[in-house]
Amino acid sequence: MLIFEKSRPGRGMDMLPACDVPEVEPAEKDRRKMALHLPEISENDLSRHYTELAKKSHGVNDGFYPLGSCTMKYNPKINNDMADLPGFTEVHPLQPEHTVQGCLAVIRTAEEYLCEITRMDRMTMQPAAGSHGEFTGLLLVKAYHESRGDKKRTKIIVPDSAHGTNPASAAMAGYSVVSVPSGPDGCVDIAKLKEAAGEDIAGLMLTNPNTVGLFDKNILEITEIIHSCGGLNYYDGANLNAVMGTVRPGDMGFDVIHLNLHKTFSTPHGGGGPGSGPVGCKEFLVPFLPSVLVDGKERLSFIRPKQSIGEMKSFYGNFLVVVRALAYMLTLGRDGVREASQNAVLNANYMMHQLKGPYTMAYDEVCMHEFVMSLEDLKKKTGAAATDIAKGLLDNGIHPPTMYFPLIVKEALMAEPTETESKETLDRAIEVFLKLYHEAEDDVQRLHDAPVTTPVSRLDEVGAARHPVLRYHFEA
């Protein structure tokens, strides 16, 4: 029930003090045409309303959340405690530099650590999300080529297994997108990549490990193909959780990268934010970075690159997300960061091998932090689609994996257990997956009806996407 539906006239409390500023008669054009519509509800009922909503949601604190490609891992509470410190929450972005030296030290230290993990030379914290980071990185690529008078490079190569934001970001940056198919092994088709590479290619956008959870064994050849034709290599850092501390994108031949601090480096995400998508680059791209970088030794100050692409966000980005990321890295240390990624890979492979047999793996080989199942055969045999298994998981207290992605796998379910789940949790999830598989064979209608224990039953997702209702309508 919406809070407006609980509203009753006279039920609310008007406790606002009288305005101590002399009342100014507004101009006619500024007058409201109708009374401000706010719910009238007691504080007690208001508190209960939001508690009810919280109980109806599902997060990592409620149960297993294997949402592939999203890295929905547990986020240590100490990181939030650090971000709540008054020295960080009570600053103002317009304060003089000498009054915010601690905050500048956080930004600079986080940059140094992230550059070490990725083998980049500098990093901007301005971008507010992964897709925002993609756009920023592509603007760096564009500025670099244009600074050399090379305006013939109008295309960006994007593999067919890429995240959907990759081609969108390339188009926003003014590039045409060239899609390169995957080979039978789930990795980039080298022959097709060589055909696409040419003097009109500005760069390549690539995720490694890729979206089917595989580390591309040809990664060094891939980046060399692009460099040999004069292009730059962009690394989508969405899957860095699988390799951080073990392999560095800069060593693979990438020139620019974005990270998801709200995934890999421990800030809760979902529900609209906050996020942070720092962009790192090699030295030759540093002059084009957004206009706020922290530099100095004894006293920190801001520097502005000479050929900067300009502001990507106001001031310094989502600063408190950077605080959380730094607390996470300091807590884990060098060895802990590596152990986290290795445990993520271990958990994914354990779960994949336990499900392999009944479930068909899209690519039957060692995966990284996530794996993709194809339910195409199950659907043909029983009529149970990937959606049915996903809805059945809800009735068992498990958030579904990512459905129908990547698009190159039919009836796909992509699961990412992350490093923060115990073996007991994984074993229970495996048991539920197997139970639902056998349920599809024995009584598929039960899966077609699922979920039946959640606050709402199966929704018309197509109708909701095509005809969204984004605001509450009321009678004046």
Image (spheres, rainbow, N blue to C red):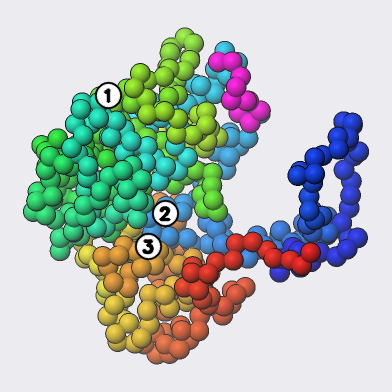
Q: Residue at x 69, y 65 (%)?
A: 473
Across and down, in percent, residue 211 comes to 30, 56
Q: Label 3, on which residue?
A: 415
- Give the Cα distance between marks 2 and 3: 10 Å
Q: Is residue 285 left or right of residue 52?
A: left
Residue 53 marker: none
Stretch in magenta: 87-97
Q: Earlier in the sequence, mark 3 or mark 1?
A: 1
Q: Residue at x 33, y 42 (%)?
A: 173
Q: Residue at x 32, y 82 (%)?
A: 379
| Residue 405 vertical placement versus 180 (above, below) | below
Q: Main secondary structure of the magenta part?
A: loop
Q: Mark 3 touching mark 1, by CB under 8 A? A: no
Q: Is residue 427 left or right of residue 207?
A: right
Q: Is residue 262 left or right of residue 373?
A: right
Element at label 2: loop
Q: Residue at x 31, y 39 (%)?
A: 138
Closer to viewer: mark 1 or mark 2: 1
Residue 283 marker: 1
Looking at the rendered structure, the kind of residue marked 2 is Cys
Q: Earlier in the sequence, mark 2 or mark 3?
A: 2
- Give the Cα distance between marks 3 and 1: 36 Å
Looking at the rendered structure, the kind of residue marked 3 is Ala
